[in-house]
């Protein structure tokens, strides 16, 4: 087996931290400034095959336009002869969705702070003529300070002069406004506000106001219950919070509260500290270079191969992976059960870890694809309901100490938590190392990695 260290221009590329249908996101480090970044990798052949050039170009341009403290920052765009690289701000705190799944509903004051930051970000987008169209807790990240960052503008729309309504049906069903499904055209701002209302309900209640696992049933509910604004709030909602949510989840977009009204609402105004983004000149030269002159403008890609086993994870990556110097999350088994991206540590040889994973996966009826020290587990049912995929990769963190990083690649997140994680981790108990409290201490772990 061979392991590689890789650079893209001035960026040292590390582990994969996310994976979608068309792209991978890798942890990277700016070798000049030392800054951590997320490097989104898109193969040009895939983009061309699926005719996604305009969509990707639009997403990149929009992220450059909407610079705001509560929006994930796009630093720059690079290209090699075969790939496009989008360099993004690295957000270490995970998704708001994972926090809700782990903690359940959040205290009202904490919900208010997140909602205030969300509305500030969405208001800034709308002021630039940008409508997100896929707002949901999975697309809301938390940084190391606990501040919210809106991400994933892949479905966003940029207002065109002379076009009043949007017509593309898109978004995530449980968060999408009823008028989006009407095929009559919709106001992008009003649709985003509806999604913000569903998010607020979700983080305060711990469950969705409108939820069905299969799309046809959800659409029937849209026609009856959602379009009529029929939902009930739990008893712990304060009267003011309940009042605001009902104004947001108004099925009529013409009477639905607007952002100006939200900001004037008594519940929203409590302890509100608005953030004013600094005005920056938007330069799209790198975007044009990537898409208009790809063959002449490219960065160097280098892979240095070394003999050995799985990729070695250095101390810098360990710290950023663990959200600061507190490395306890690497060993918190309770947290592992609920997070979309989970990790466990093992003292077993990497080949034994992979073999155990393959055996457990097969016992769960999953298809297994292994290459080097990365395994993809897939479940595809006949009617494609409940379909999901998992990627597991083994890293060496110290001599005879290995970490398995497990992340969801596709599938319904709520069902995925319920049906996969706990069962999977329980069956791997024989290879998971359970250190004493002293060993989980950062200073002890640092001595392990020396």
Image (cartoon, rainbow, N blue to C red):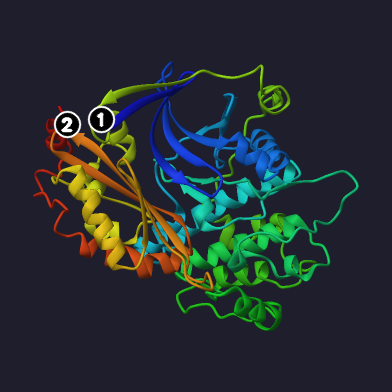
Q: Quadrant of the rendered structure where residue 284 is?
A: top right
Q: As rendered, which of 358 and 5 lies closer to the eye?
A: 358
Q: Is residue 329 above or below residue 266?
A: above
How far across and down, in percent of the image, does residue 128 sit? 74, 41
Q: Quadrant of the rendered structure where residue 188 is?
A: bottom right
Q: Are marks 1 and 2 in contact (CB under 8 Å)?
A: yes
Q: Which residue is mark 2?
A: 449
Does residue 290 appear to the left or right of 343 in the view shown? Answer: right
The answer to whether any part of residue 255 appears in the image is: yes
Q: As rendered, which of 414 and 326 lies closer to the eye?
A: 414
Q: Is residue 234 above or below residue 102?
A: below
Residue at 68% x, 66% y is 177
Q: Give neighbour class at mark 2: few <14, some 14-19, many 20+ (Cα, 10 Å).
A: some
Residue at 14% x, 51% y is 433
User: In the orientation shown, which residue stands out farthest toward the right?
Assistant: 162
Does residue 220 appear to the left or right of 347 in the view shown? Answer: right
Residue at 66% x, 64% y is 194
The mark nearer the N terminus, 1 or 2, is 1
User: In the orientation shown, which residue stands out farthest toward the bottom?
Assistant: 224
How far across and down, in percent of the image, does residue 297 sit? 64, 18
Q: Which residue is mark 1?
A: 315
How far across and down, in percent of the image, does residue 38 sit? 47, 35
Where is the N terminus found, in terms of image quarters?
top left
Per the model, the C-alpha gap separating discs 1 and 2 is 7 Å
Q: Quadrant of the rendered structure where residue 430 is?
A: bottom left
């Amino acid at each position: 087996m061979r392991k590689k260290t890789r650079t893209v221009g001035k960026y040292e590329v590390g582990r994969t931290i996310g994976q979608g249908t068309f792209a991978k996101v890798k942890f990277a480090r700016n070798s000049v400034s030392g800054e951590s970044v997320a490097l989104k990798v898109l193969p040009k052949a895939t983009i061309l095959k699926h005719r996604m050039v305009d969509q990707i170009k639009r997403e990149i341009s929009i992220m450059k336009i909407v610079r705001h403290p509560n929006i994930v920052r796009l630093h720059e765009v690079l290209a090699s002869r075969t790939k496009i690289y989008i360099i993004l701000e690295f957000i270490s705190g995970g998704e708001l969705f994972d926090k809700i799944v782990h903690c359940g509903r959040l205290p009202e004051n904490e919900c208010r702070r997140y909602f205030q930051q969300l509305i500030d970000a969405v208001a800034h987008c709308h002021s630039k003529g940008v409508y997100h169209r896929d707002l949901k807790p999975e697309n809301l990240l938390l940084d190391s300070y606990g501040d919210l960052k809106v991400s994933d503008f892949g479905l966003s729309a940029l207002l065109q002069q002379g076009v009043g309504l949007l017509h593309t049906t898109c978004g995530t069903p449980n968060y999408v406004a009823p008028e989006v499904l009407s095929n009559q055209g919709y106001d992008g701002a009003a649709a985003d506000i509806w999604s913000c209302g569903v998010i607020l309900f979700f983080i305060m209640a711990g469950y969705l106001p409108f939820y069905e696992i299969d799309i046809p049933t959800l659409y029937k509910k849209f026609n009856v219950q959602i379009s009529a604004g029929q939902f009930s709030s739990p008893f712990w909602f304060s009267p003011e919070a309940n009042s605001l949510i009902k104004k947001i989840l108004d099925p009529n977009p013409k009477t639905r509260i607007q952002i100006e009204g939200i900001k004037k609402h008594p519940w929203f105004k409590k302890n509100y500290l608005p953030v004013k983004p600094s005005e920056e000149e938007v330069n799209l030269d790198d975007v044009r270079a990537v898409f208009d002159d790809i063959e002449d403008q490219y960065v160097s890609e280098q892979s240095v191969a070394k003999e050995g086993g799985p990729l070695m994870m250095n101390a810098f990556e360990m710290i950023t992976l663990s959200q600061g110097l507190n490395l306890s999350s690497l060993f918190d088994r309770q947290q592992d059960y609920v997070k979309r991206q989970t990790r466990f540590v093992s003292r077993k040889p990497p080949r034994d870890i992979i073999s155990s994973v393959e055996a457990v996966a097969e016992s769960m009826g999953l298809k297994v694809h292994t290459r080097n020290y990365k395994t993809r587990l897939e479940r595809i049912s006949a009617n494609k309901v409940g379909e999901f995929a998992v990627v597991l990769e083994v890293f060496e963190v110290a001599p005879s100490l290995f970490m398995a990083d497990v992340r969801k690649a596709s599938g319904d997140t709520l069902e995925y938590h319920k049906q996969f994680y706990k069962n999977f981790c329980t069956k791997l108990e024989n290879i998971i190392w359970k250190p004493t409290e002293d060993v989980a201490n950062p200073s002890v772990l640092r001595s392990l990695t020396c």
